[in-house]
Structure formats: C-alpha cells, structure tokens
Image (tube, rainbow, N blue to C red):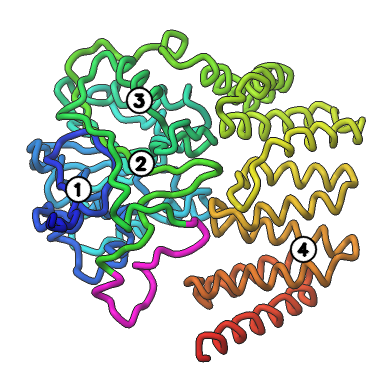
C-alpha cells in the first residue's frame, strides 16, 4: 500500500520570478520584516498582501540593499509598512502615490503627511521618509539617484499597457546603474490577460514581451510561473467578501492557518494572482519604445483603442475597439472589455440617437455572455445603464442582477450597482421585487463579514441616492433574511 504524503508546498529561495503562494508564509524562514511587525497586526490576516510584502522585504535583505547609505523609492506605496521597515534600514525612503483625502485608491487616502507617518505599526526615524504626491510615470526623482525601487501591486494601476511601459521607463530613469527594482503585479492564471484599466493583469505572452523590452535590465534568479492550486489559501476568493482569515473566529489558530481563498481574485471572467520579480539595471540601454514592443497584435490594438478613448478621440477608439471586438472570438475576456469601452465611445458619439438600433447592438453582445453567475460586471454594468437609457427597463434590471451576483464584483461596486438598480426599479414601479433582491444582497454581505459601521456608511450613501423610505424597507427585509438564517442554523 502506498503511503500518503501530504503536500506542504515549497518555499522558493529569493530572489526569483514566481507567482504568489500562501504556503510560503507557513515557513519559519521569514524575513526581518515579518519579525519587526507586531504579532497582532491586522494585515497578517490578509496573506495575499502579506506574501507580497514579505517577498519584497526578503529580496531587499538578501540582495544587501538595506544599507544606511541607500535610497529607496516606493511606487504607489500608499501607507504600506514597507515604507517604515525600509526607513529603519536605509538612509532615505521616498514614498510616492496619488495621496489625498479623496483619492480613488483607498490605500492612498491620507489628508496629511503626518497622518501617513502616524499610521506606522512600528517605530522608525521619521526624518528618513519623504512622502511625495506623484504619478508612477513621473516621480520627480533625480535621474540615477535611487538604489532600489519597490512596488507592491501598483504598477498595473495605469489605463493601458502602453502606460505600463512608461512606468518601466521611469524606473530605468531614476535607478542608478546596478540598482534594483523589486516588483509585484497581477498575473492571470486563467491564460488570457485581463486588461481593464487599473488592473492590467499579464499572461505569459505579455510577460515575455516585457522581458524582451527591458533592454537595460536583467531578471535576477530563476523563473517559475507554476501555481500551487492545492493550497486552500490560494483559491479564488469572491471580491465582495472579507477573507475568512480576517473574520473573528472561535478558533483563531484555524482561521489563521487555513486562510481559505485569499490569494487569487476573480476579475471578470479571469482569475488573477500576484507575480513577483526582481530587476537589476545592467546598462543604460533603456526600455524599448511602445511601437517596437513585441506585443500580440490584438493586445496592441486594444491598448491603442483605450488610449484613444481616454484622450477623447472617440472615432479612433471606435475603429480600434470594434476591430478587437469583431476578431477576438478566441478570447471572450478581451472581447468583453473591448465592447465595454466600444459601446461607451459610441454613446459619446451620438450613436444613441437611434435608440433601438443602439440597444440591439448591446443585445447582440449580451448573447455572447456565459450562463450562470460568473460574469464580468465591469463590462455588463454599462450595458445595463445604457439599456435603461434606451427605455429597455426590464432588460436593464436583469443585467444589473447578473452584475450583483458575480463573484468578481467588488464590495464597492456591489453598493454602486445596488444604488443604480434600486433607483431604476423604483422609478419604474418594480419596488417590491427590487427591495427583496437588495435585502438579500445586503444580508449576504453581513453574514460574510461586513461590519456594522461600514454597512451604516454605505447605507447612508444609498439613502442619498434612492431615498430613506426605500432603504428603510430594504434594511427591514435584510434583517428578516438574517434572522431566518440564524434560526435555520439554530435548528
């Protein structure tokens, strides 16, 4: 009889190019960053982010980059603890992000520099840190003045792939010769890339194109892009819910170690995980110009179509995005994203004047969407809105329901969709059915970790959009849903 051998995962030596793996956090060979952070630090319960921070910190340590004479610069650094950890080791740390009290990125919402520095979970020399409000593509750092750059899942926060190469060009400009960049970003384990602006998750083809385009750099260490799908912590986790490991539990030990479904995220029709790698600047050969990058044709056309869309060049956007939409039958995800911006560009260009024809175009796209709850809410959201504007109310409400059910719909997006859904339904005498659906969605979120204070804040925003009476009815039904669930568990 063969002996059962449990799978524990293998911790890879740093530096290397690899995909995230929660199993590596269960090793005892963690970095000084892990040792420095408080044992009860909340973010330890979020292993996706913790894995990335630990990877970056350990690589910096192994490569002897944490020196008193070193200058480190973080791209899209928010208030992450790496800023303060590096400040204890390096003479100068520059934290860059689009900092403001109303930033689109939660991690960058700081009113003042003092508020950011006060958020540190550890003591550090404050005079070692400079906080700079700066775009990743234009950091304002002096040329060849930085010893190492780090970024934790931020370089993808640009509109297009073309902009991503501008980020790499800025890294090349500010790094000293021999300097390093330790980076994590998003990678699709579902084969095709997911190129929504602000996400820009790579696949193997994009990784290869980037590797060849970084002419003045070398990747340090071996590359292993296999994914450990056996560990429960690496499973795809619906984005609307808090990770199980972050919730209060009767057994904190089990909550911490099992970490069910934390590392992978569903986005649209894709699954993304972190990819981490280390670059060393070995020459001043620079970064290949976008026009010469060996990127697959459809991805280039899509990226250039998006660039035209964001520049307000709607005709160019329509031509390029329509080409991608009509020729991407083998990539349903790319087809969805191309249509999302194509139909918006058409709406901006007065195509809605012929409402029935315009709505029929949307219906033609909707026929290609998959059955079941796995939907790309970012693509379908605008379809629902435009169908409503065209007078197809019932169809619009149906599409909003699909968006609300999708596991890739984030918590913020869920409440945004609820507001639109309730407003449209109440305006057109569908209040009873919409109240029940909205109540069930909210009850579901509460039972999966949505806190009372967060719920109250979000419900207040809903009230401002659809009225106190409508939200009062929704919350009354939501409480009834929760009570039924509690009673069922008790039985």
Q: Are marks 4 and 3 in contact (CB under 8 Å)?
A: no
Q: Which mark is residue 422?
A: 4
* 49 sits left or right of 405 in the view: left
Disc 1 versus disc 3: distance between alpha carbons? 35 Å
Which stretch appears magenta? 238-255
Mark 2 or mark 4, which has the lower sequence index? 2
- Report the residue marked by disc 1: 128
Extreme-front residue of the structure: 1
- Nearest the camera: 215 or 337? 337
Whether the magenta-drawn stretch holds residue 250 is answered as yes
* 257 sits left or right of 234 in the view: left
Q: Nearer the viewer, mark 1 or mark 4?
A: 4
Disc 2 versus disc 4: distance between alpha carbons? 39 Å
- Nearest the camera: 91 or 430? 430
Callout 1 crowding tier (Cα within 10 Å): few <14, some 14–19, many ≥20 = some
- Nearest the camera: 91 or 159? 159
Vertical relation: 253 (above or below) 17: below
Disc 4 versus disc 3: distance between alpha carbons? 42 Å
Q: Nearer the viewer, mark 1 or mark 2?
A: 2
Q: Are marks 2 and 4 in contact (CB under 8 Å)?
A: no
Quarter holding the N terminus is bottom left
Vertical relation: 211 (above or below) 475: above
- Report the residue marked by disc 2: 96
Whether the magenta-drawn stretch holds residue 195 is answered as no
- Report the residue marked by disc 3: 207
Q: Nearer the viewer, mark 4 or mark 3?
A: 3
Mark 1 or mark 2, which has the lower sequence index? 2
Disc 2 versus disc 3: distance between alpha carbons? 25 Å
Query: Residue at coordinates 69% horizontally, 61% vertically from top-left?
Result: 418
Residue 429, quarter of picture: bottom right
């Amino acid at each position: 009889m063969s002996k059962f051998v449990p799978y524990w995962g293998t911790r890879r030596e740093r530096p290397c190019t690899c995909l995230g793996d929660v199993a590596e956090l269960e090793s005892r060979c963690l970095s000084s960053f892990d040792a420095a952070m408080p044992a009860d630090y909340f973010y330890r319960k979020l292993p996706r982010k913790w894995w990335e921070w630990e990877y970056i910190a350990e690589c910096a340590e192994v490569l002897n980059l944490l020196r008193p004479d070193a200058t480190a610069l973080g791209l899209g650094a928010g208030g992450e603890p790496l800023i303060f950890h590096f400040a204890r080791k390096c003479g100068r740390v520059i934290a860059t992000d689009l900092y403001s009290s109303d930033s689109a990125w939660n991690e960058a919402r700081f009113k003042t520099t003092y508020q950011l520095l006060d958020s540190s979970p550890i003591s550090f020399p404050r005079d070692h840190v400079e906080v700079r409000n700066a775009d990743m593509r234009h950091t304002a750092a002096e040329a060849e003045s930085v010893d190492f750059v780090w970024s934790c899942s931020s370089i993808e926060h640009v509109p297009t792939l073309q902009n991503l190469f501008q980020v790499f060009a800025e890294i090349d400009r500010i790094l000293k010769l021999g300097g390093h960049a330790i980076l994590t970003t998003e990678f699709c384990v579902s084969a095709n890339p997911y190129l929504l602006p602000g996400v820009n998750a790579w696949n193997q083809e994009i990784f290869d194109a980037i590797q060849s385009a970084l002419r003045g750099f070398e990747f340090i260490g071996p590359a292993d892009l296999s994914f450990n799908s056996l560990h429960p912590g690496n499973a795809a986790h619906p984005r609307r819910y808090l990770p199980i490991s972050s919730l209060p539990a009767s057994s904190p030990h089990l909550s911490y170690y099992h970490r069910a479904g934390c590392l992978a995220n569903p986005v649209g029709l894709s699954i993304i995980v972190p990819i981490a790698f280390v670059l060393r600047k070995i020459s001043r050969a620079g970064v290949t110009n976008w026009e010469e990058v060996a990127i697959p044709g459809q991805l280039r056309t899509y990226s250039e179509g998006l660039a035209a869309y964001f520049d307000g060049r709607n005709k160019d956007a329509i031509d390029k995005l329509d080409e991608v939409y009509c020729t991407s039958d083998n990539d349903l995800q790319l087809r969805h994203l191309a249509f999302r911006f194509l139909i918006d560009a058409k709406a901006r260009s007065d195509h809605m004047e012929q409402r029935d024809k315009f709505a029929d175009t949307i219906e033609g796209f909707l026929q290609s969407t998959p059955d079941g709850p796995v939907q790309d809410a970012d693509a379908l959201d605008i379809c629902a809105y435009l169908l409503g504007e065209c007078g197809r109310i019932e169809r619009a409400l149906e599409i909003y329901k699909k968006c609300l059910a999708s596991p890739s719909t984030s918590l913020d997006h869920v409440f945004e969709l609820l507001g639109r859904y309730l407003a449209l339904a109440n305006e057109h005498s569908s209040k009873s059915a919409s109240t029940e659906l909205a109540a069930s969605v909210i009850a579901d979120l509460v039972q999966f970790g949505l806190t009372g204070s967060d719920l109250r804040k979000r419900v207040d925003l809903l009230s401002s959009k659809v009225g106190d009476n409508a939200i009062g009815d929704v919350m009354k039904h939501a409480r009834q849903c929760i009570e039924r669930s509690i009673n069922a568990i008790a039985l």
